[in-house]
Image (cartoon, rainbow, N blue to C red):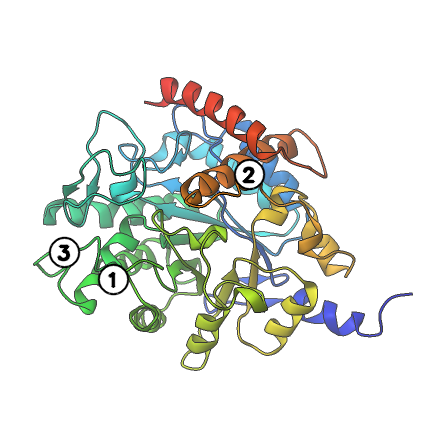
Amino acid sequence: MPPKNRTRRIAAVGSPLTLPCGVTLPNRIAKAAMSEQLAGIDGAPSQTLTRLYRAWGRGGAGLLVTGNVMIDQRAYVEPRNVTLADERHLEAVSNWARAGSSEGAVMLMQINHPGRVAVGPLHRRPVGPSALRPQAVGFNLRKPRELTLDEIDDLRRRYARTAELAVVAGFAGVQVHAAHGYLLSQFLSPVANQRGDVYGGNPANRRRLLLEVVAEVRKAIGPTAILSVKLNSADFQSKGLEEDESLDVALALEQAGIDLLEISGGNYEAPAMTGVVADSTREREAYFLRYAEQLRARSAMPLMLTGGIRTLDFINDVLGQGAVDVIGLGRPFAVRPDIAADLLAGNREPETLPTAPRIPMPGADPINSYLQLAWHAGNFRRIAAGESQVSGRGAVRTLITAGTTVSARALTQF
């Protein structure tokens, strides 16, 4: 016997949403970006990646956001990231877009540059807004070089070119990654950005590059493609980007005409996006809800909330209240590719699915964050191979498998 409120519960999450650019999402569930690490050694999307998105596309989500796609083959977030800097991989990228959208899901490509946290190529020195090492273990081994103004100009063009190619290949639009301690997030951070020119020194200057990139991307993809941005609510780091300044950035992005803002938080030093560090909303569900509510009070911009969402009642309540417009789920899709269909039918809760393993010891945050990435990556291959429910490995097996895989990839990628 279905619950009496089932119709109301399904109505909110199952309702369509038309974005300012005119693209309509068939429902309010999004598969949020998770790093797949499934490109070939040349940066092209692999057949495994295409099969993975075909499975997710059949799974009922209204929106599929890809993991990191690099705008420059000279800087990777992780081994085997897809790279889209020119037309050489366009056919494979088109196959990827068709696979994900063939059942009606809207496909967004997340475009990114790692800046000072690049893992490779190992022979290249990372770049950043300032010549300051990140404090995250492993990422502080190489001191980055400060970007010149000419190099910043080149980066703007690269973001725009990758966005243009994504839309040409069949993606509905792009998501500019300005969160999690990557390059654009570094420019927003008072810790990482200590420049003395027009790109640093005060909040308006720190957000200048992001707004310039957004303007260039919009020019490249036109008014009818989706332009989304992923933004930290805060860095959760001493003297980093804080909520008040982030709210000002979000309002500036609304003025710039973006179609969807995804709210996240944290970076490699404080990985709030994985749940290892979370703000005070965690106990009432969703890591970044408080920020979303503050932004909604000042903005009508479509908002996507991702992180720590556990129940269908919460999803429908927050959608019904209008605090956000889209709910992003990550880990549930790494376990069950059709979780969205189950949610839309009112048959399952995200919290009932297995979650990534963690090491229960103080000071293990960086290891736990890496564990979650490795656990996801292993599950993606199993989903691509046809599994409909993945139980996942434990912490020890995940570490062993990931260490072996990363070592093998490092030899081929770098």
Residue pointed to by mark 3: 194
Q: Is residue 169 above or below residue 195?
A: above
Question: Residue 317 at x, y = what percent?
Answer: 64, 74
Secondary structure, mark 3, is loop
Residue in the image at 21% along x and 34% along y: 142
Sequence-wise, which precedes: disc 2 or disc 1?
1
As measured in the structure, the alpha-carbon distance from the residue carrying label 2 to the one carrying label 1 is 31 Å
Say what amino acid the circle numbered 2 marks: His
Say what amino acid the circle numbered 1 marks: Lys
As measured in the structure, the alpha-carbon distance from the residue carrying label 3 to the one carrying label 2 is 35 Å
Residue in the foreground of this view, choosing between 392 and 151: 392
Q: Is residue 386 above or below residue 221?
A: above
Secondary structure, mark 2, is helix
Residue pointed to by mark 1: 239
As measured in the structure, the alpha-carbon distance from the residue carrying label 3 to the one carrying label 1 is 12 Å
In the figure, residue 376 lies in which quadrant?
top right
Question: Residue 90 at x, y = what percent?
Answer: 42, 34
Secondary structure, mark 1, is loop
Sequence-wise, which precedes: disc 3 or disc 1?
3
Residue pointed to by mark 2: 376
Residue in the image at 65% along x and 40% along y: 55
Q: Is residue 202 above or below residue 377?
A: below
Number of residues whose C-alpha sits closer than 10 Å to that of mark 1, classed few (under 14), some (14–19) or many (20 or more): few
Number of residues whose C-alpha sits closer than 10 Å to that of mark 3, classed few (under 14), some (14–19) or many (20 or more): some
In the figure, residue 88 lies in which quadrant?
top left
Say what amino acid the circle numbered 3 marks: Gln
Residue in the image at 41% along x and 50% along y: 271
Question: Residue 348 at x, y = what percent?
Answer: 75, 56
